[in-house]
Image (cartoon, grey):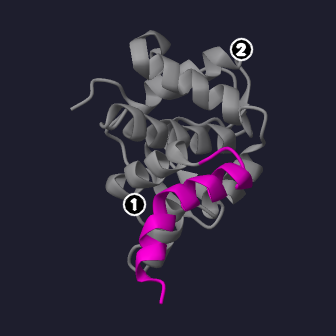
Amino acid sequence: MTSVSVHDVVAFLLAQARGHLSTSAIHRMTYYAQGWHLASAGTPLFAEEIRIRKTGPVAHALFPLQKDGCTEDSWPAGNAHAITGHSAEIVSYVFNSYGHMSGISMGELAGREAPCILAMARKTAEDPEPVLDLADMKAFFKALDDAPDDQTAYANRFMARYTDEALRVWP
């Protein structure tokens, strides 16, 4: 199991942001950090659960330490220096890729992604904020990493993979 906590990830993200992120952006970026780490390293970045709400993914472990305001400037419960090597590269990638977005926008984006959709499908009255499945996250982010850059590249990949088979079964 990992020795990094979600709190360390938050401290790292705040260091990248030079100490100013909305709480909603923090929650969404922990989702993206976990997903990209699963896809790239094959293992979870941190052990804490990520759950889905109507507004997007959240890490419940962060709630008791959040300030009353809408932004955070530091996260004393975490150690930014605990994120090293490839994990640091991944979390930096997440910050550089998503850090320009608002937490609301990231929540809307994540809500359209398969891991969140699948988790929401498991929502019940007893479990209104289901846990995101790590296997779903890993599969989704691996597929996203493998996705072509544009529609032409997608069509070319499709043709390369399926044309020969399609021609064999064509009447």
Secondary structure that dominates the magenta span = helix
Does residue 153 belong to the magenta stretch? yes
Q: Secondary structure at mark 2?
A: loop
Spatial CA span between label 2 and label 1: 30 Å
Q: From this viewpoint, which residue is outermost toward the top?
A: 81
Question: Type of residue at label 2?
Answer: Arg
Q: Secondary structure at mark 1?
A: loop
Please name the residue that numbered disc 2 is placed on. 18
The spot of residue 133 in percent (x, y) is 36, 58
Residue 151 at least partly seen? yes
Q: State which region is magenta.
A: 148-171
> Which residue is at a point 33% across and 38% down the rendered structure image?
44
> Which residue is at a point 72% across and 32% down the rendered structure image?
99
The spot of residue 60 in percent (x, y) is 46, 49
The spot of residue 4 in percent (x, y) is 34, 25
The spot of residue 17 in percent (x, y) is 70, 20
Quadrant (top left/top right/bottom left/bottom right) for the N terminus: top left
Nearest to N terminus: mark 2 or mark 1: 2
Question: Type of residue at label 1?
Answer: Val
Above or below, 163 against 31 in this view is below
Please name the residue that numbered disc 1 is placed on. 131
Q: Relative to the observer, which residue lies in front, 148 or 133? A: 148
Q: Relative to the observer, which residue lies in front, 74 or 6? A: 6
Above or below, 124 against 164 in this view is below
Does residue 65 belong to the magenta stretch? no
Q: How many marks?
A: 2
Q: Relative to the observer, which residue lies in front, 157 or 26? A: 157
> Which residue is at a point 38% across and 40% down the rendered structure image?
38
